[in-house]
Every structure is written in structure tokens, then in C-alpha cells.
Image (spheres, helix red, strand yellow):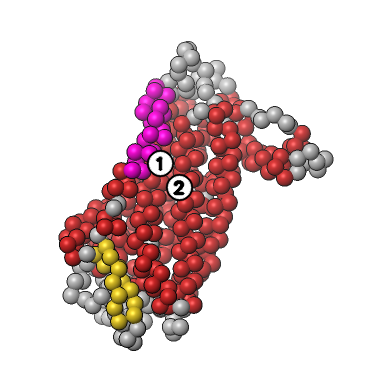
């Protein structure tokens, strides 16, 4: 095993989610060998980095993040999102609200993303036990995992944008939102988005291949490199992908939710006096949920946004730059934050709604201690109504064809 817990190699330090950024800078060093052991404990020049990361600190942080924190976050998120899908899915037919369709799909994509996070933690464990076996596993499956990760990241961003648009329309034009495409065809929009994103990201699969080479110890390692015929177009694709996922998506979510906050403030001041309080509270809950989900999405994207911006400004903070440890440090933080973002949605719902917590307790009791004297919630044999659940319901309107 290497003198460091995580060997300083491109294979072991690279993240599946952010692999395209590593490749972006790899392709700018075409005269460099396919791979060389590259990192030093001291900067190569007198230039000082923004954040100086030592080998020892990076090793410890990588171990804690990949082997300890990632499994904890992923397992917690898997349990939370699975329970959330069960709760929302159980009462979806009673509510028939579009926003819940988007929430269900968001949690479904989050579950897949967290499963991949667990698999990546396993591969990092293999690297610790056997550097070369870990290198072979990571490189041969890196782009398949990166392709799926990127699809899931894009779909999560799209769903949060759609949820934000739906909430804004519901606040500004509550009687028209039902007839909008976002409300009428949520599954069609999600399916079409998934197909388009999958096609758009195909360069991750068709433009890259795995090659083997002998390192300085005369042992075989593997490396994922762009195919020569796809070099220039893949370079442009990676730049476009970095801009779309790391800049346009967070900025769009931020702008939409500022608009929601303004519209919601106006709604609270102008809402009709005849509106039932529980209905007003229901709209408050779902709007606050969307705002919280979107806010966490933006906040947890900041480490990724910071390092990608720094990369465009200074090539020293790149895969082969003299401050590459700083690059990988923030890449690892970004991946950890992305998994945290996928894991916390369910817990946001629990924190926002006291009645939602009651539904969860009732669901657990009915499933685990039904007809026992110790559990009062099992006394109810009929499903609670949407109003009892504290979930949004259709608002009264002048005609049966409109909804608030």
C-alpha cells in the first residue's frame, strides 16, 4: 500500500460526479504523459495558493469524507427518501397536486444518486486495500458512473426549476396554473427531459475510452482519456456542460425563488379573508418546502461553483496544476455536498410540517404496532383526509374547473 492512505494518482483522487472537469484540464496538457505521480507537499513556485492543502490533511479528509461520511449520508438519505415516497405516494390520489408529482420524482432520482454514492464509497475502500485493483475498477466504470451521475444532477436541477415555476405560477395566477403545461403534463415533461438529457450527455460515453500503461514502478495502471477523433468537440462539450450545470442551473433556481419569496410575501398580505385557515396554511407549507429545497440546492452548490470559477481564472488550480490538492479538496467537498443535498429533502418536509411528522408516526405505528394498546395512532382504521394530513388541498373557486 502507498505511503499515503489515498495514493496520489489521478484515479484515486478523481470524483465520478466532477470527472468532466478533470478531463477538461487533462486535455489542455496534451504533451504531458498519460499519467505521472503528481503532487508535492510544497508548492512548485513561490506563488501561494488561496487555500494551502497538505498531503496529510488531504489524506485524512478524503478518508473521513469517502469512507465515513458518505455511507452515513447515503444510508440516511436512502431511508428518508424511501419513507417520503411511501408517505407521499400513499395519499397522492387524494391530493392530485402537480407539485407532489415533482417531489416524488425528485426523491426517486435522489435514491438512485445515493445508491451510486454508496458504490463509490465501496470503490474507495477497494483503493485503500489494493491501489491497482481500485484503479482498474474506478477507471473501467468511471464514465458509466459519471454519465449516470450527470443525468441525475441535471434531472434534479430541472425538477427543482419546475417546482419553483409551479409555485410561482400558483401564487401569481392560482386559477390559471391548473391549465398550464407544467400542471397538466408533469410526467410527460419529466420523461421528455430525461430522454433529452440522456442524449445530450452521450459524449461522456462515446468520446472516451480506457487505456492501460506502465507506471514508474513498471506496474499496469489504467487511464480514461478522450478519443483522438473527439478531442476538440469533447473539449467544447465539457466547457458547455460546466457552464450549464454549475452556473446557469443554480442562478435560475436562485432567481425563481427570489421571485417566489416576493410573490409569497404579497400573497400573505392580500389573501382573501374567506379563505379557510387550514387551506392558507397548506399553501404556506408547500411553498416553504419548495423554498427550503431550492435554497439548500443553491447553498450546497457554492463549493462547486467556487472551485469551477477558480479553475477558469487560474490554471494552477487544475488537475495537473501546482495546487492540484486544492482542486481535489473542493471537488471532494462538492461531491459530499451533492450527496447531502440528495439526502435532506425528506428531512426538510419533516421539519416544515408538524402534521407531516404526525402522518409519519401514524404510518409507522399502523405498520409496526397495529391494534396494540401502546400505540394510540392505530385506533384510526380509515385513511385520514388531505386536510387532516396537513397537505395542500384544492381551494374553492367559482367554477369546478379551476383550482387555487
Residue drawn at point x = 43 percent, y = 49 percent: 297
The residue identified by callout 1 is 159
Residue 328, picture quadrant:
bottom left
Quadrant of the frame with the N terminus: bottom left
The residue pinned by badge 2 equals 109
Residue 389 lies left or right of residue 21; in this view the side is right
Name which residue lies at 45% across and 18% down: 402
Q: Nearer the viewer, residue 391 or 202?
A: 202
Question: Is residue 115 part of the magenta span, yes or no?
Answer: no
Could you tell me if the residues under marks 2 and 1 are in contact, i.e. CB atoms within 8 Å? yes
Q: What is the C-alpha distance between the residues marked 2 and 1? A: 10 Å
Q: Nearer the viewer, residue 264 or 346?
A: 346
Q: Quadrant of residue 381?
A: top right
As drawn, the residue found furthest toward the right would be 373
Q: Earlier in the sequence, mark 2 or mark 1?
A: 2
Looking at the picture, how far across and down is residue 377, in whole percent? 74, 37
In this view of the protein, can residue 49 be seen by the observer?
A: no
**Which segment did they paint magenta?**
176-195
When the figure is inspected, residue 241 is found, relative to residue 316, above or below; the finding is above
* Residue drawn at point x = 38 percent, y = 34 percent: 188
Q: Secondary structure at mark 1?
A: helix
**Left of 222 or right of it: where is 84?**
right
**Is residue 126 found left or right of 313 in the rendered image?**
right
**Residue 343 coordinates in the image, percent (x, y):** 51, 52
Amino acid at each position: 500500500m502507498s505511503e499515503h492512505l489515498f495514493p496520489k494518482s489521478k484515479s484515486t483522487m478523481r470524483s465520478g460526479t466532477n470527472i468532466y472537469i478533470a478531463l477538461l484540464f487533462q486535455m489542455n496538457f496534451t504533451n504531458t504523459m498519460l499519467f505521472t505521480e503528481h503532487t508535492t507537499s510544497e508548492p512548485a513556485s513561490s506563488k501561494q495558493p488561496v487555500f494551502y492543502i497538505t498531503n496529510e490533511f488531504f489524506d485524512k479528509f478524503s478518508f473521513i469524507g469517502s469512507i465515513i461520511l458518505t455511507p452515513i449520508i447515503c444510508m440516511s438519505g436512502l431511508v428518508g427518501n424511501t419513507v417520503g415516497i411511501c408517505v407521499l405516494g400513499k395519499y397522492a390520489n387524494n391530493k392530485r397536486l402537480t407539485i407532489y408529482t415533482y417531489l416524488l420524482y425528485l426523491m426517486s432520482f435522489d435514491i438512485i444518486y445515493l445508491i451510486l454514492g454508496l458504490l463509490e464509497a465501496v470503490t474507495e475502500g477497494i483503493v485503500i486495500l489494493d491501489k491497482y485493483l481500485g484503479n482498474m475498477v474506478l477507471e473501467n466504470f468511471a464514465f458509466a458512473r459519471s454519465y449516470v451521475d450527470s443525468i441525475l444532477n441535471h434531472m434534479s436541477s430541472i425538477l427543482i426549476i419546475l417546482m419553483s415555476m409551479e409555485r410561482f405560477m400558483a401564487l401569481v395566477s392560482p386559477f390559471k396554473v391548473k391549465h398550464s403545461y407544467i400542471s397538466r403534463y408533469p410526467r410527460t415533461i419529466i420523461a421528455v427531459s430525461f430522454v433529452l438529457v440522456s442524449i445530450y450527455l452521450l459524449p461522456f460515453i462515446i468520446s472516451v475510452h480506457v487505456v492501460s500503461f506502465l507506471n514508474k514502478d513498471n506496474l499496469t495502471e489504467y487511464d480514461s482519456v478522450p478519443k483522438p477523433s473527439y478531442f476538440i468537440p469533447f473539449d467544447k462539450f465539457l466547457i458547455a456542460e460546466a457552464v450549464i450545470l454549475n452556473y446557469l442551473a443554480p442562478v435560475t433556481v436562485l432567481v425563481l425563488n427570489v421571485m417566489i419569496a416576493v410573490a409569497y410575501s404579497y400573497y400573505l398580505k392580500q389573501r382573501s379573508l374567506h379563505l379557510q385557515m387550514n387551506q392558507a396554511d397548506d399553501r404556506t407549507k408547500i411553498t416553504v418546502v419548495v423554498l427550503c429545497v431550492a435554497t439548500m440546492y443553491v447553498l450546497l452548490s457554492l463549493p462547486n461553483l467556487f472551485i469551477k470559477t477558480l479553475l477558469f481564472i487560474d490554471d494552477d488550480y487544475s488537475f495537473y496544476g501546482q495546487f492540484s490538492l486544492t482542486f481535489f479538496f473542493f471537488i471532494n467537498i462538492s461531491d459530499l455536498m451533492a450527496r447531502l443535498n440528495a439526502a435532506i429533502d425528506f428531512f426538510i418536509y419533516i421539519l416544515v410540517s408538524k402534521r407531516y411528522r404526525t402522518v409519519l408516526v401514524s404510518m409507522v405505528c399502523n405498520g409496526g404496532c397495529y391494534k396494540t394498546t401502546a400505540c394510540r395512532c392505530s385506533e384510526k382504521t380509515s385513511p385520514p383526509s388531505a386536510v387532516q394530513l396537513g397537505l395542500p388541498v384544492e381551494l374553492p373557486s367559482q367554477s369546478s374547473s379551476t383550482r387555487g
